[in-house]
Amino acid sequence: MSMERVELPQLHDHPLIPFNRFVSGWCYLCNPLSLFTEPGRNVNFYGGYRCNELGCEGAVFHKDCAKPLKEINHSIHPNHPLKLIIPTFPLFKSQQHTCFCGKRFKVGYCCTICDFKLDLECATRPEPLVLPENSYGHEHPLKLFSEPFDGDTLKICKACRIFVKMKVPHYRCQECEEFVIHVHCLDFFPEAYHTSHPQHPLKSFRGPVPDYTDKSCLLCEMEFDQRHHQLHHCGVCNFSICRTCFHYPPPVDVECLKTHEHKLHLVPRLIDFTCNACGTQGNQSPYFCLQCNFMIHWECIDLPRVININRHDHRISYTPRLGHGEWKCRVCRKKVDGFYGAYTCSKCPTFVVHARCATRTGVWDMVELEGTPEEEEIAPYEVIDDNTIRHFSHDHHNLQINNDGMTLLENTLCKACLFQIGSEPFYICKQQQCDFILHEKCANLPRKKRHVRNNLPFTLHTDSHFTFQCRLCCQYSTGFRYQSGPYVTIDVRCALISDSVEHESHPHPLYYHSTSKKKRCSRCRKEISFVFGCDECEDYILDGKCALLPKNVMKKRYDDHPLFLSYGDMNMDETYWCEACETKVDAKEGFYTCNDCGVVLHISCVFGDFSYIMPGSFIYVAFRVEDVHIRECYMTSSNEQVVSNNSICRPLCAVCNSRCKLLSVLKFGAAPVCSNDPCPSVEDIADHQILEVLNIFRYKIESTISHTLTLTIATEARGSSLRFQSGMNAEGCLVKDTVLVKGPYVVDGWINLSDMA
């Protein structure tokens, strides 16, 4: 790269590297307010400096902002020089200042004599104090102001037709007071030339887009908002661009030797082409080298050479030409043309990704690895001999392999995945009094890996006292987990899948999709934003819980053979009966069955809320007014404990009053609670727990007043009041009518159960 690395110790704690590509975002320092942009829009600016540290992709700087001048002179404040304001580190904790234009900023310029201040954006705009006569179609001189009008009446800007707000810089005529225009509207009122269209001036439109124009910006492809969008249009050429591209124009010429040996020129027009860098189709405004007939998307200029993506555990590298062969992109699953550029893995020759797919923000971790040595993979265990290892999660004892095919009891669970060992090979602790056991495949789980659920790397954590919810299948677990950043956690079962699953309910592969709009699962009908969908049947979607159910399971209580996950035809009504609960099974929702004996079980009679929580684990059930759920936290003791349900006589559920059928149940005090229909979730547990504690509260009252109380929960205000019938009022007087009693057990929407008990 031609630009050197830059360190800004007072602005950012990592070194910055130069880039010669387009970046969508905001400069970390000047961060221009949306005066020139549409709501929610980012700016596509070319070239500058960026942070290359993991998780710090938002730190992007203009070239000039990364090296601001220590002192400047400005036309708005001609009497004194303005000195650079150097903030304290870290930047987000530094003092805020108010610019002449009214914006708040942390890096800018100030006059030490007058306390006049400018942010970096305004410092680059040399606005004159007075505009001469006949400027912008007005016969009188226009003077720059930045204080409110006399009186309460606001004027409308002649350019954008928006009210001129108090303290916002504007030009106005002192003689007639009717002509007012924002400072930032001068560039395009009533019309102005643009670098991308020098032939004719562009006229500013605000409001509905003319019917004959294109419905999107010719430069950035953003669709025009029909209600309040402002566009700039040439009626001669039918050329339209958005407000953002008008004020932040792309460069007409780009010189990037990493991309092409010659200078590239912007072609601002509708034109169908194949991008030489990525091999995908484009239809407008490419950059072009006439000498080489080289054409490229603006997004593909200066593509990173070596990167990591969340679809593969190895690094991938950009190559300008794949060569002959049949290639398929591992992200979008469409054909990759071998005569154009793409990303490949040196260790996996068949792994190929389109350049634009690999560099998407939801796929790439935004770190460039060219010139950075690859990290050595840390083995999860130390090999002692051919049959013995010492695993990092259990480093005080050795583990011995067992691969003779013996089938263990169904309540013998792997410490990592919390699933039955069954007849799979496993490692078991050599100490007789230690019950630590791992599937062989779980013992080989890598310490770090990549996964589609997040573009940052995942790290394996093995502490067993932590209850977490997997962000893919939504199951609670106390097993091993992979964590990416502070918020994304998945269990090891989900970590083993790639971005696709072969599912028994559908003939085609299902691929992972993350959408901003929630979609409904075709089986359980729940709505969720990360789903597995079929490319061929667009309306078939499964959520993570349905898509990642185990394919087979052992349930010795009902059958000696493995039970396999099966589904009925969506277009046929088939009726089966569950062996466990003796009720009907809707085949469309799925069921487990024995292929030899025909035994059928509901999925909810095989797996429940506590199926992936190790028996003996303590969990914390949180109660709020708006919902009830298991909380993610470390627990070593509490009133709620998950216990095994492997006795001959199954316990009676305290909520649904039926026999608990699952291998693991929640024990609250002395009362067991199911986690399957008709107790499908922790909401039912909440009612039971609240009633139990409130009954304790009732007994305390009865012992002091010698009067029997009837207690129910006030369903219309659950969690904020109790209903006592034939009880006492808030002052302790006995009454016959129903009253609502409020007390100190409600704190900020949380029920303080310990205080009540």
Image: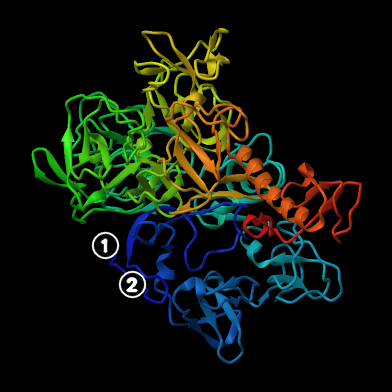
Question: Mark 1 = which residue?
Answer: 2
Q: Nearer the viewer, residue 699 or 501?
A: 699
Q: Residue at left 52%, top 80%? A: 109
On the picture, is 712 further left or further right than 686? right
Q: Quadrant of the C terminus?
A: bottom right
Could you say which quadrant of the image residue 46 lies in?
bottom left
Quarter of the image holding residue 332? top left
Q: In the shown orientation, is residue 239 left or right of residue 593?
A: right
Q: Secondary structure at mark 1?
A: loop
Tell me what residue is drawn at x 85 percent, y 50 percent.
727
Q: Nearer the viewer, residue 546 or 19?
A: 546
**Structural crowding at the residue carrying mark 1, measured as other residues with C-alpha within 10 Å and reported as few (<14), some (14–19) or many (≥20):** few
**Crowdedness of circle 2 by 10 Å Cα count: few (<14), some, many (20+)?**
some
Q: Amino acid at mark 1?
A: Ser
Q: Is residue 204 above or below residue 418?
A: below
Which residue is identified by label 2? Answer: 7
Q: Is residue 695 above or below residue 569?
A: below
| Residue at x-position 34% and y-position 33% | 498
Q: Residue 215 location, x and y as percent?
A: 61, 37
Is residue 125 in view from this perspective? Answer: yes
Residue 225 at what x, y percent from top left?
65, 43
